[in-house]
Amino acid sequence: MKPVSVKNLSITLGAAQILPDVSFDVAAGECFGLVGESGSGKSTVLRCASMLWSIWDGEVRIGDQSVRDMDVMERCRTLQMVFQDPYGSLHPRQSVRTVLSEPLAIHGLDNRQDRMKAALSDVGLPSEFLDRFPHQMSGGQRQRVAIARALILEPDVLFLDEPTSALDVSVQAEILNLLARLRQEKGFTYIMVSHDLAVVDHMCERFAVMQSGRIVEVLDRDDIVANRAKEPYARELIGASLAYEQVV
Amino acid sequence: MEPILSVKNLGVRYGGSAEWAVRGVSFDLGRERLGIVGESGSGKSTVGRAILRLLPGAEVTADRMRFEELDLLDIPERRMLKVRGARMSMILQDPKFSLNPIERCGDQIAEAYRTHVRATKRKARAKTLEMLEAVQIREPERVYDLYPHEVSGGMGQRVMIAMMLMTDPDLVIADEPTSALDVTVRLEVLRILDGLVRERGIGLVMISHDLNLVRNFCDRVLIMYAGQVVEVLDARDLDQATHPYTQGLIAAQPRIGGDRGPLPVLQRRDSWVEGAA
C-alpha cells in the first residue's frame, strides 16, 4: 500500500492556465474521488499524475518517490489506469491473451500463463476468455478485461477514470463491487474520477470537488448527507445531485 | 380521449439479423408523458425510431401503428416527410453530434421551421428568437448567431429542444435527452422540456436508461428487456415494481448515503424473455 501526494500540480500553455494549482493527499489504501463537471480538469489530473502528459509543473509522489524520477518500467509497476470506455480502450484486433501477455513480456515476468489466468479469475472471468476478442464480449466483460490488464503488473495504485459511466446500472453494480473487493484483497490505493456523486459516495472515503481546474473543496463522504459543504459550487453540485436522486 | 399514438404488437428486425430487436410492444399514448426504460440493447431507442420511421432496411411489423389519423405502417415516405419534424419530432442525446457544426444555432432552428411552415426569413427569425426565449436562453439575439461549438452542452440541448418544438408538434420523442449533460444542468433542461410539453399539451415519449429521471418526469413507464416490455407502471409506483428485472435495476443503483455494502447484482433469467411474449 502506498500513499499518493499531489503538490502544486499546474499546467500553463502560453497565457492559458489549464490547471492553476492542484494539491491533495491520498492515504495508503484509501479511495479518493475527484468530482466535477465535464471540463473541470478531473481527468487531466490523472493524466498528469500518471505521466501520460509530462508538460506540467509541481510534484506527484507515490510512496516516497516522485513519478518523474521513476523510469517507465517502474512507473508501470507502481501505477496503472482504467479508462472510461471499454469499447475504446481495448484494441479491437487483439485477443485478451495478447492484451494481458504484452506487459508480462515487456517486464520479463515468468509464469505468464498462470499470471494471466490469475488476473482473469481476480476479475471474475473464466480462463477461456483468453482467446476472445473485444467484439465477442459485453461491455461489462470488456471493462473486466481492462481491469485485469491494470492488475497484471501488480501495481500499488490504480487510477480509475470514470470506470463505469459507459455501462448500464446493473453492470455498473458488478464493476463497482469488483473494484471494492479488489481494494480489500490487494490493498490498492484508488483515485477515482466520476461525475456521479452517488458512485463516489458509494466507493470513496473522501473526495475533491473540482471546478475549472481548481479543487474547490475536499470533503468526507459523510459531509454529503450531513450538508457540511461550505463552498458555493460544492453545495450546488451536491444539491443538484440530491435533487436528481430525490433523496431529500 | 383519443390517443395521439397507438402501437399494437410492434416488432422490428434489423436487416440480416435472425433475432427480433423488438417484439410484441404495445402501448397507447395520450397527452401524457410516457417513459421507456431499459438497458443498452433492450430495444428502447429502436421503438422510438420505428415510430418516426427512421429504420431504413429494417423489417417493421405491427398489428397497428397509428399516429392521429395516419397509419404509420403504410403511409408513403413522401407524406412522412411532411409529418416528421412537423407533427412529430425527436430530441437526440448529444447536442455536440446532432447539431450542424458549421451552421449558426439560430439559422438551424429557423431552417427547421421554414422546412415545414411557409414563412419569410424575417418571420422565421422572429419566431426563433421567441422560441429561444421559451427555452430560457437569456440573450436570444446573441445565441442566435453562435455556432454549436461556442455553446455549452446544456445550452446546446436547449437549442435542440427549441428546434424540435418550433413547429408545434403533437408528439415528441426524447431519446436520452440529458444523459450527455452534467448533473448541475440536467434538471434545468428537463424542467424546461417538461414545462413546454405540459403547457402545449404535447405527447412525450422519454427514452432513458435512468430510472430516477423517468420517475420524476413521466406519468407512466414501460420497462423493456431484450426487446420486450416486461412491465408497465405508473411512475409513482416504481418502487412497488413486481417484475424481478425492474426490482433488480432499482436495487443496483448506488445511492447517496446508502450503506456502501456490495450492490445487489441483477440475476438475469431466460424466462423473462419468453414470459412476456
Image (spheres, helix red, strand yellow):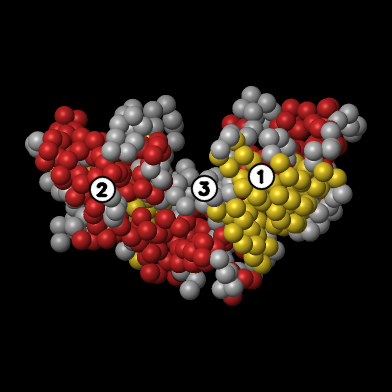
User: Is residue B20 shown above or below A179?
Assistant: above
Is residue B118 left or right of A146 when viewed as pictured? left
Q: Nearer the viewer, mark 3 or mark 2?
A: 2
Amino acid type of disc 1?
A: Ser
Q: Residues within 10 Å of mark 2 (few under 14, many from 20)?
A: some
Q: Which residue is mark 1?
A: A10
Residue drawn at x 36%, y 44% is B156
Q: Of residues B2 and B216, which is closer to you in this image?
A: B216
Residue lying farthest front? A15
- Examine the image and state in which quarter residue B124 appears: top left
Residue drawn at x 68%, y 35% is A55
Q: Which residue is mark 2?
A: B140
Q: CA distance from mark 2 to mark 1?
A: 37 Å
Tags 3 and 2 in contact by the CB under 8 Å rule?
A: no
User: Is residue B274 shown above or below A198?
Assistant: above
**Chain that bears disc 1:** A
Q: Secondary structure at mark 3?
A: loop
Examine the rendering and report whether any part of residue A134 can be seen.
yes
Q: Of residues A237 and A95, which is closer to you in this image?
A: A237
Residue drawn at x 69%, y 46% is A9
Q: Which residue is mark 3?
A: A38
**Picture coordinates of residue B155, whole percent (x, y):** 36, 48
